[in-house]
Image: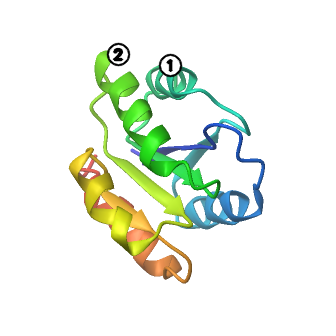
Amino acid sequence: MTTRVLIAKVGLDGHDRGVNVIARLLRDAGMEVVYTGLFQTPEAVARTAIDEDVDVVGLSILSGAHLTLVPLVIAALRTSGCDVPVVVGGIIPQEDVAALHSAGVAATFGPGSSMQDIVATIEDLVPAH
């Protein structure tokens, strides 16, 4: 089976160039990508993750609101019974990475992250189908 990845832009972050690049990268790596579009709520992300039966949720946040929004998304996912890994990409200061991991994030990707590392990390997070 193909790995299904939900890519979401949460909150008021209107920058989508990077997330479109990542979506294409993951598709080119053989993954199925569901992109929610801009301005999603944590609850909408959780609902889409369940409806689309995804294996991983990827959040793209460039607004600086990652410490607020990411825990809300994880809480919405878990409350809805969705226990898939969550990865976060964007402008993530190094000093915030530990807090995100403590909140339940499986991996973070900042500027300059290797495309190969992103694909390999997602493949490692999803058990073989």
Q: Amino acid at mark 1?
A: Arg
Q: Amino acid at mark 2?
A: Ser
Local crowd size for mark 2, using a 10 Å CA cut-off: few (<14), some (14–19), many (≥20): some
> Residue drawn 44% across and 33% down?
73
Determine which residue is flagged by label 2: 80
Residue 54: image location, x then y, percent: 44, 35
Q: Nearer the viewer, residue 3 or 91?
A: 91
Instruction: Residue 70: give x, y in percent of width and height.
Output: 43, 42
Residue, disc 1? 47
51 to 63, vertically: above or below: above
Image: 29 above or below 71: below
Q: On the image, which quarter does residue 28 sit in?
A: bottom right
Q: Residues within 10 Å of mark 1 (few under 14, many from 20)?
A: some
In the image, 5: left or right of 123? right
Vertical arrangement, residue 41 with respect to residue 29, above or below: above
Q: Is residue 121 left or right of residue 44?
A: left
Tell how many labels: 2
